[in-house]
């Protein structure tokens, strides 16, 4: 079997690695450099617990199932690539800065614990014991021990190395213009007017999935812009050790002292401007929670595009054209969902039958007027 994958973000690389491990001939097409899309822009939070929201029960189950896979996935990936992925297990603090925030947080926490998520309420003093530099007016915090982080840029590097070591081929700076169908099934992809033949084609082009010509309709995937920035802490005396979600910004401390502050959520198409309003909102949100950031140097600003489907859940599995598969629309949780997407898509391709973990996430749900709830 010959497989072509369009897009070398975490999703395309993860699926490619799992297939190459099983001895499948896999070629990954990437129009730029591997991992330079949303997978580069992300914060790397694995936030299955804190992301548990009413109305997203099926997605919550998928998120938590992927979360459980992450520690072993990270260990296997590090072993296969010889590279660290920067997994940190300190957990996440969601903080309230006033009584209103606190009431909302307790309300969210009641729902999340009802879903079996393990969370702990902390008084301001208890929260400051864990993070001494948090703002003095703290009203309380929720601690989620299960929500951890990886360095998503390191994950991309490791996935690429593991994919190559397993025998996969990356064709970077190579744009796929369209997918070719023949005799009622997929036949390959067109790259600069040349047909590359394949038995299976996987569309994993993230927010750009709608730009690839397909013989069958693909459910809409739109870009959801996120502006981000990073400040530099002293790695030997960092201002923060846990991931912190404040009411208007989140902060993710890396081992090398980088503190990532994110992220705006904007419907602006592929506009990649860093705006005064975006940077102001992030800095203001972070500063209210952690005033000490005022002294820190801004070392990077960037923009990324979350691939958003109509119901915010990923689109996984078969299309209307036999042999063409979708693995896109991972929105704000694509790093979290990498292990389960990679495993379930690879087993779906190998078995010719949709893996039961992803049956709720098929493209046909949109034609049938359903959404993932
Ligand atoms: C600001 C921001 C913060 C985020 N934070 C988190 C987080 O903390 N935790 C989390 O789990 N998720 C997070 N996400 C979401 C996560 O980054 C995405 O869901 C995930 O990276 C999607 O991966 P992907 O491989 O589908 O897409 P991408 O990484 O975008 O990869 C798609 C690739 O396809 C390539 N491509 C496109 N068109 C073509 C073509 N025609 N031919 C060849 N190649 C093509 C692109 O160049 C790109 O490299 C965040 C996203 C953003 C933007």
Image: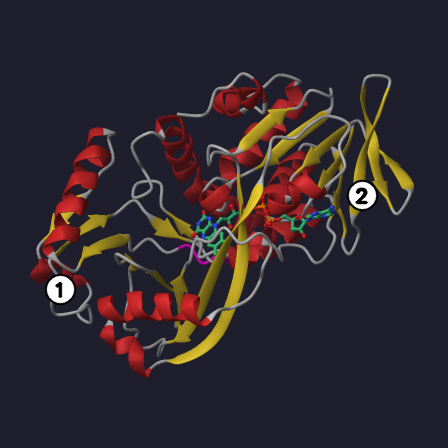
At a point 34% along the width and 70% down the height, the residue shown is 283
What number is the disc on residue 39? Answer: none
Residue at the image position 49 percent from the left and 70 percent from the top: 301
As helix, strand or loop, the secondary structure at mark 1 comes to helix
Above or below, 29 relative to 343: below
Identify the mark nearer the N-term, 2 or 1. Answer: 1
Q: Position of residue 372 (x, y in %)?
A: 44, 25
Distance, label 2 to label 1, CA atoms, is 54 Å
Q: Is residue 45 magenta?
A: no
- On screen, residue 163 above or below 196: below
Image coordinates of residue 54 in percent, x first then y, are 29, 32
Range shown magenta? 83-87
Bin the neighbour count of mark 2 within 10 Å (Cα to Cα): few under 14, some 14-19, many 20 and up. Answer: some
Disc 2 under 8 Å from ligand 1? The reply is yes
Give the labeled residue for mark 1.
Answer: 129
Judging depth in this view, the residue of 124 and 219 nearest the camera is 219
Q: Please give left or right for residue 110 compared with residue 318 in the image.
A: left
Is 188 situated left or right of 68 in this image? right
- Residue at the image position 30 percent from the left and 69 percent from the top: 284
**Which quarter of the figure is the C terminus placed in?**
top left
Q: Residue at x 61, y 30 (%)?
A: 219
What number of labels is visible?
A: 2
Residue to which mark 2 is pinned: 177
Give percent across and percent down for residue 183: 86, 17
The N terminus lies in which quarter of the figure? top right
Please name the predominant secondary structure of the magenta segment in the image: loop
Q: Position of residue 31 (x, y in %)?
A: 74, 53
Residue 267 vs 112, above or below: the answer is below
Left or right placement of residue 71 versus residue 11 in this view: left
Q: Secondary structure at mark 2?
A: strand
The answer to whether residue 255 is seen in the rendering is: no
């Amino acid at each position: 079997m010959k497989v072509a994958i369009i897009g070398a973000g975490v999703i395309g690389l993860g699926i490619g690695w799992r297939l190459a491990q099983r001895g499948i001939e896999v070629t990954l097409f990437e129009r730029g450099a591997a991992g330079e899309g949303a997978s580069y822009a992300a914060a790397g939070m694995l936030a299955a617990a804190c992301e548990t929201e009413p109305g997203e029960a099926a997605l919550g189950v998928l998120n938590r199932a992927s979360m459980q896979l992450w520690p072993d996935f990270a260990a296997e990936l590090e072993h296969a690539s010889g590279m660290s992925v920067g997994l940190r297990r300190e957990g996440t603090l969601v903080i309230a800065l006033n009584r209103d925030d606190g009431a909302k947080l307790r309300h969210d926490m009641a729902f999340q614990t009802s879903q079996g998520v393990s969370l702990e309420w902390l008084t301001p003093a208890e929260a400051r014991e864990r993070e001494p530099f948090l703002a003095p007016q703290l009203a309380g915090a929720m601690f989620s021990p299960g929500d951890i982080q990886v360095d998503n840029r390191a994950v991309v590097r490791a996935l690429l190395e593991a994919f190559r070591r397993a025998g996969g081929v990356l064709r970077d700076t190579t744009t796929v213009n369209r997918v070719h169908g023949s005799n009622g099934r997929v036949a390959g992809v067109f790259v600069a007017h040349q047909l590359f033949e394949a038995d299976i084609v996987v569309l994993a082009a993230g927010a750009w999935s709608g730009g690839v010509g397909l013989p069958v309709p693909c459910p809409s995937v739109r870009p959801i812009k996120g502006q981000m920035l990073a400040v530099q802490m002293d790695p030997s005396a960092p201002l923060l050790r846990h991931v912190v979600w404040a009411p208007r910004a989140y902060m993710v401390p890396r081992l090398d002292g980088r503190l990532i502050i994110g992220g705006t959520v904007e419907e602006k198409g592929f506009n990649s401007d860093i705006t005064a309003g975006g940077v102001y909102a992030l800095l203001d949100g972070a500063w209210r929670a952690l005033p000490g950031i005022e002294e820190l140097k801004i070392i990077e600003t960037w923009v990324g595009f979350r691939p958003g489907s109509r119901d915010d859940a990923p689109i996984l599995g078969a299309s209307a054209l036999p042999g063409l598969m979708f693995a896109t629309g991972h929105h704000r949780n694509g790093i979290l969902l990498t292990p389960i997407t990679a495993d379930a898509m690879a087993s779906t391709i190998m078995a010719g039958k949709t893996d039961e973990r992803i049956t709720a996430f098929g493209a046909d749900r949109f034609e049938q007027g359903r959404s993932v709830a």
